[in-house]
Amino acid sequence: MATLRFQALAEVMKRRPKMVSLPSLKVSDYYGEMVFGKETMARYLSSEAYKAVNSAREKGAPIDRKVASSIASGMKAWAIEKGATHYTHWFQPLTDGTAEKHDGFIDFGDDGNIIEAFSGKLLAQQEPDASSFPSGGIRQTFEARGYTAWDVSSPAFVVGTTLCIPTVFISYTGEALDYKTPLLKALAAVDKAAVGVCQYFDKNVTKVHTNLGWEQEYFLIDTALYQARPDLVLTGRTLMGHSSSKDQQLDDHYFGSIPERVTQFMIELEIEAHKLGIPVKTRHNEVAPNQFELAPIFEEANLANDHNQLIMDVMKRVARHHKFEILFHEKPFAGINGSGKHNNWSMGTNTGVNLLGPGKNPKGNLQFLTFIANVMAAVYKNQDLLRASILSSTNSHRLGANEAPPAIISIFLGSQISATFQNLAEKITDQKMSPEEKTAIKLGIGRIPEILLDNTDRNRTSPFAFTGNRFEFRAVGSQANNAAAITALNAALSVQLKSFKKDVDALIEKGVKKDEAIFQMIKKLYLESKNIHFDGDGYSDEWVVEAEKRGLTNITSVPESLLKYLEPAAMKSLVKSGVMTEKELEARVEVELEKFTMKVQIEARVLGDLAINHIVPTAIRYQTLLIENVKGMRDIFSEAEFKSLTESRLELIKEISGNISSIKAKVHDMIEERKQCNIIEDATEKAFAYNEKVRPYLEDVRLHIDKLELIIDDEMWPLPKYRELLFTK
Ligand code: ADP
Ligand code: MG
């Protein structure tokens, strides 16, 4: 019988692109048709209900029960027209991905007949049995009640036959059990703090919103081949596999023409995304073979993140229509590029100004530099927090590897902005400035926009790069929920901006002119946090040495990094800003540590099983063939001829034996270590033990398997090889 691998390969040979029929309408005609957005609401809601939703969205005003009922009935009418039969509170628990429990609209009416029902109460709040979602011990299982509550700032939408209502997920005692709640708080904190600072420049600024444009990288693998790789199915990455003789050396995949099967997938995906109001815009090949990227036009961060969570689901579903599986894992294949999710991040005011983009005049530019300097300071003081927000068991394989930023957090500013800051630092003194000095400084600042326009300075090796009108946080993992990173960033910046304002106000109080006070504080922030600024090659070995000299931290251990969430610097940002309570933070760290432990545990189990049940038997079978062959040779050749002819075969038999023995011994030891680790009860200790004692075996065992893959008869090898996973189209 052919192995699953050959069956899969035979299936792949028969694949033809599944052609997608293009909609007859323009995108602007069907964009957002599955979303209960502003225009739709205006049509389906009473004007009272419509106003209530809008003021809840804009000002956070509460919606009363009666109005909620009226909104629910409008929403239901619309959803039923779109084919919905069920509704769900859609939320983002601390596991990966989103959660939903579907309930039918079906209900008994007053006289016992069947009706479609959806009340304001059901729209606003629900109590899913949440005991099986991670809570880090906040919610004991006997107190299993958590509740979901409608996030009015993100519109409801219909997927398939279900009306989805974006919600937060909170424990009965009020602690956040999800990614969305702290994100919303962090966005509000930065809003408030940034408005305070903007007021120095423009009294009309009353609201600052955060923008997020994510770039989602992913791999596409044929379903049949994927199914023949239990490691991919169970862990999301290949735990073994010798590198393909050709992979990304020729750089021929990046921006190359997209294969037809993939194009058809992308077309269908875009149509689905646009119907859901997700403004996807860019699609291209990425560096590694079979790796691609999708990016939308940026949106307000909470909505953008909901859209990213939603699209990851849509992508998986649409991929299957085209017989593909999506890999969102940060490092599905050793030796070639992994996947990230660059977070393009900026802030805009109600007056239409991008605070991270150069202004139109010296005043606007001073505001711009103020924000850049504060971002710099926030990142400098919160390196460990930012790293903790992006590091996971899966993303740790990518960071520090050759193609990805190391686990050192630094900021790229580009030569122009760097020069401007340096110039300011030299010119600004604590003395009262003469009008000439001020003019000189302002003239210098005034030139920023022209300079930046020609500034094509791009640094792809920085984890946190300024790209002209935004920062790009590139260290975020491809399967992560962006909310963790954006929450950390915004919380840190909010605290930083507040302290900046306090310092500037104190100087003004002492009689220093406002603009001089701002100049002085920018200089101070720049000088204090200069060490975080690095425009060079972040992948180089020299940077690691240099960063250490500068006192920057470089942490690759996931548990160690997670614990930084609980250190004073991170607490200051997250707790002081009101984004999380200490209890929530502790719970979150516990959940993340447990997630880490479980992921390593699962990988170790899967690798052990595959090694012993798939690889060792295959190796023995091939070895037996060789032995039979050698025995037969003895029968037909003279002693001398036999010796010289079989020497290399005996070597091969020995080599196979050696690898088999090593695999068996190492898998045995790995299991023993796991048993020891499993006795440990404390989540932190256990994560450290798994990291130090169990995790190294994954590489050790793999090494021998990959050696066997190179010598064993290809026809016998049970698992699809890298070249097959990566190059079949
Ligand atoms: P690149 O790969 O060159 O970095 P892409 O076009 O792939 O750029 O993606 C850039 C992302 O950044 C897009 O989502 C885009 O909408 C977003 N973006 C552009 N300007 C801003 C901004 N001011 N704030 C936030 N995101 C932005
Ligand atoms: Mg980018």
Image: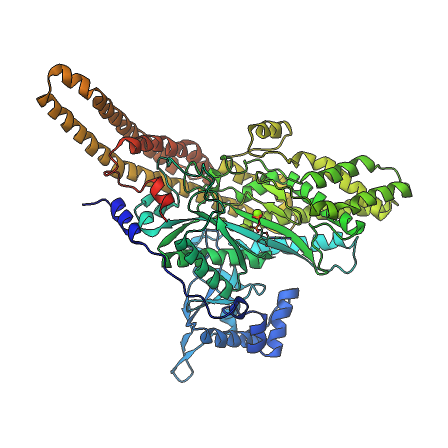
Q: Measured from the top left, where is residue 594 in percent x and y?
A: 45, 43
Q: Nearer the viewer, residue 304 or 727?
A: 727
Position of residue 583 relative to residue 429, above or below, is below
Q: Measured from the top left, where is residue 69 in percent x and y?
A: 54, 75
Left or right: where 636 falls relative to 463 = left
The residue that appears at 55% across and 68% down in the rendered structure is: 28
The residue that appears at 66% across and 65% down in the rendered structure is: 59
Q: Nearer the viewer, residue 623 or 560?
A: 623
Q: Nearer the viewer, residue 722 or 615?
A: 722
Which quadrant would the N terminus be assigned to in this image?
A: top left
Q: Work out whether residue 583 can be spotted.
A: no
Residue furthest out toward the bottom: 111
Q: Measured from the top left, where is residue 126 in percent x and y?
A: 48, 65
The residue that appears at 42% across and 41% down in the rendered structure is: 597
Position of residue 346 relative to residue 45, above or below, is above
Residue furthest out toward the top: 640
Q: Measured from the top left, where is residue 509 in percent x and y?
A: 85, 47
Position of residue 542 relative to residue 269, above or below, is above
Q: Work out whether residue 47 can be spotted.
A: yes
